[in-house]
Amino acid sequence: MHNLLELQTAFAGAVLRAPEPALLRTIVDDGIAAEARLAIYRNHYRITLEEALAATFPVTRQLVGSAFFATAAERFVSVTPPTAPCLFEYGAGFAAFLASLPELASYRFVPGVARLEWGFNLAYHSADHRPLAAADFAALAADAYAGLRLRLAPSAILFASRHPALAIWQAHSEAADVGAMRMDGGPCRLLLLRQDEALGWRELDAAELAFLAALRRGRTLEQAHAAALRCEMPFDLTAAFGRLLAEGSLAGIDSPAETGGSQ
Amino acid sequence: MKTSALVVASAVATALSLGAVSSATAQQAKNEKCYGIVKATKNDCQTATSSCAGTAKKDAQADAWLFVPAGTCEKIVGASLKPKS
């Protein structure tokens, strides 16, 4: 006989794989066999997660076709139980899973588009923040600026792909006519951002991406600026910083001004 | 203060003194549910919580919907933004 914890563990196991005989003996048949009753849960679990993936990755699904997507989703679901209770949180590893599939070896842009869709999903469901304004810097001395560690908004997602993921995504998800598109149209670097309820994005060059990635890693402004300059292309810190303020993608200042700037 | 720190301080000070500059983020197109035009078994469900996709029993079922770009639905004969009773 089971105690409650054993019963719950055995039931959870039966949702993922064939049930233990001991569990079957504790289920009342009542017209439908115990095995068939458990199969209802097993099916519902699988179908719900597969549909959550289809809802989160609609363009990826269009790209590979619904039949292949269903097969891939089924395989992913079978090896990836959810780790959080909300369905929108399911699918973090799906793009990497797609990248591992030999069937997609000659469609390298597909996992890139899946990563972009996951980025949109993360940005959309991220925590709210109060955007930093110029006034938040008023109390700081100018010689402290270089040492500041600026925190990017939770919804600010940095995205980079060797493939034109955004152009592919737009061609499949928007009414706008994007014109002729080349799958080898070059790399794509984006800052995704949720502003109130709207998802936004803007394109970045390699230097600005390096700058933002350094900020995301908790580097100081001076270190982030140096990271941008290492890209050996023009980088305008005044303009880049102005854009962050204007679009509201800064959420906080982590380094106190009193400690002074550079070291 | 090192030169690199001075460069950063001066660039940030300039940006702060310029005030609000225009930001140019593109916005995602909005989609909406479009009822009454779905081919049987081809309805969308577009939520991560329901399992009703692909269950419409007949063509143009009044309560079955497709997710389409905003503005498209009102151009389609027989389509409705609300489920038809």
Image (cartoon, helix red, strand yellow):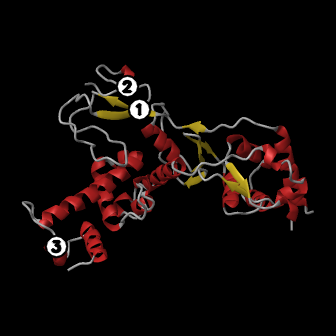
Q: CA distance from mark 3 to mark 1?
A: 47 Å
Residue A103 against residue A23 in the figure, above or below: above
Identity, as a three-letter code, of the amino acid under mark 2: Cys
Residue shown at 81% from the left, 44% from the top: A135
Residue A84, image x, y percentages: 43, 62
- Callout 1: 10 Å neighbours few (<14), some, many (20+)? some
- Give whichever of A16, B41 is nearer the camera: A16
Residue A260 seen by the camera: no
Identify the residue position indicated by label 1 in the image.
Answer: B32
Q: CA distance from mark 2 to mark 3?
A: 52 Å
- Callout 2: 10 Å neighbours few (<14), some, many (20+)? many
Is A139 on the left or on the right of A116, as rendered? right
Chain to which mark 3 belongs: A
Q: Which element type, helix, strand or loop, lies under badge 2? A: helix
Residue A241 against residue B83 in the figure, above or below: below
Chain to which mark 1 belongs: B
Identify the residue position indicated by label 3 in the image.
Answer: A26
Q: Considering only order in the chain, which callout, 1 or 2, is on the residue closer to the N terminus?
A: 1
Q: Are marks 2 and 1 on the same chain?
A: yes
Residue shown at 19% from the left, 74% from the top: A23
Q: Which element type, helix, strand or loop, lies under badge 1? A: strand
Residue A131, image x, y percentages: 69, 46
Identify the residue position indicated by label 2 in the image.
Answer: B73
Q: Are marks 2 and 3 on the same chain?
A: no
Is A18 on the left or on the right of A255, as rendered? left
- Give whichever of A157, A167 is nearer the camera: A157
Identity, as a three-letter code, of the amino acid under mark 3: Thr
- Give whichever of A115, B17 is nearer the camera: B17
